[in-house]
Amino acid sequence: MVISMPRGTQDILPEESRKWQYIEEKLRKISSDFCYEEIRTPMFESTELFSRGVGDTTDIVQKEMYTFMDKSDRSLTLRPEGTAGTVRSYIENKLFAQTIQPQKLYYVGPMFRYERKQKGRYRQFVQYGVEVIGDESPKIDAEVISLAYNIYKIFGIENIKVSINSLGNPEERRAYNEALIKHFEPRIHEFDEDCNNRLYKNPMRILDCKVDANHELVKTAPRLLEYLGEESKAYFAEVLRHLDALGVKYEIDHNLVRGLDYYTHTAFEIMIDNPEVELKTLCGGGRYNGLVKLLDGPEDKKGIGFALSIERLLLALESENITLPIDDTIDLFVVSMGEKAGDAAVKLTNDLRLAGYKAQNDYFDKKMKAQMKIADRYKAKLSIIIGESELENDEYVVKDMESFNQETVKRENIIKYLEEKLRGEK
Ligand code: HAM
């Protein structure tokens, strides 16, 4: 029986992986322009990191982790997200002692969640994320949100919406949670099982309920904003003021609570604004002022970040009918006729590749016409033809595959000739 890939995973085949490379390159470029540096952390961590960091009551920890015991009886978990591992690394490697603070980090890599399979929801997916750890300022919050927002813009995705909220500090949230329990308790039986389970453990998550989102009680629930103190309100107002100045369009969403426990103050999501797309959330993030301390790092080190998955970015590109400008051509195909010319073609192709040209030759001594066909399939810009007479005269015929013009070039001049011919594109 043919073995198939695990449910919720996907093979990214060459045609698709070109898009991934293009996207990853752009993400690395914009990260570097914003002065973020890459961090690479392990794909598995101690299970405790996530149960403590992401939070015991979250869906991720309760239902979605790939947890296993290793041969030494340690409980390990494939990372479901990147923030906890990045913060662990920040603490373990004492990045808080670096002279530049805050540390501005980004990562690109696979994450694992045992979720129900759905378009845009995978069990292995690739997150690009950033984390700014070490300090707090509304300017940082605005920078991070602007970075996320502009990522979609640089790919030409215009139909996006930033939803933003402030989750306040833990004391403010405690008071708010009590108010929510009072509000929902008498009629919690009208909600689904998940919400019932959330009532005492994490009542804010009822506002995020997928099944009963339109329930009257969700709409009339008290608003967190009313429970924020002056300081939190002023901080949020400053973040919004900077976002206005940076030209980031946003909407305040009082029900935006996010599904991970570590958030404080600013929380945001970016959605695709297209009624035809079912799974709208492209990106999510927020501030986590208590996480470094919770993971036994220095108390005063605060953080903020976001993550997006490349899978959903690709879906957004698709739904917006955006084609990425991917170059799938090669520079040259070396066509040869006869055994000796075939050997010369192998050598020439190798030389061209080492000179930085994307070059391919025929392996099977095919007829000239068949080789030309292969050159077309490769989308070669030029073909170099070597036959017996070319070998004798130490020259090549170079054919432009679009205009069909051809020229004879002396062997010693070939690299110079190609440089001129293809220079504009290098
Ligand atoms: P999250 O909201 O759980 O946040 O995930 C962030 C993004 O990852 C989502 O908006 C979505 O694009 C993508 N994503 C999540 N699950 C899946 C899935 N099963 N398949 C495909 N894409 C998925 C976090 O992970 C936080 N660590 C973000 C953060 C960073 N907060 C602060 N810093």
Image: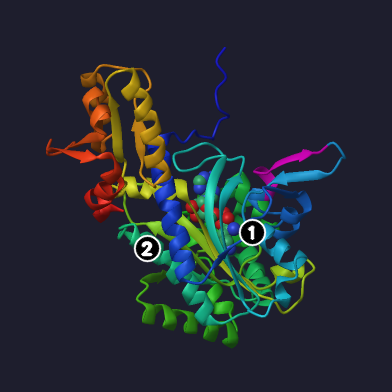
Which SS class for mark 1? helix
| Residue at the spot of label 2 | 161
Is residue 169 covered in magenta?
Answer: no
Q: Which residues are magenta?
A: 61-70
The x and y percentages for residue 69 are 81, 39
Q: Inspect this view and state whether residue 128 appears.
A: yes
Q: Is residue 129 above or below residue 112?
A: below
Mark 1, other Cα within 10 Å: few <14 / some 14–19 / many ≥20? few
Q: Which residue is mark 1?
A: 185
Residue type at mark 2? Lys
Q: Quadrant of ligand 1?
A: bottom right
The residue at 56%/82% (across/down) is 137
When the figure is inspected, residue 152 is found, relative to residue 192, above or below; the finding is: below
Label 1 sits on what residue type? Glu
Q: CA distance from mark 2 to mark 1?
A: 33 Å
Q: State whether residue 376 appears in this view.
A: no
Q: Is residue 63 magenta?
A: yes
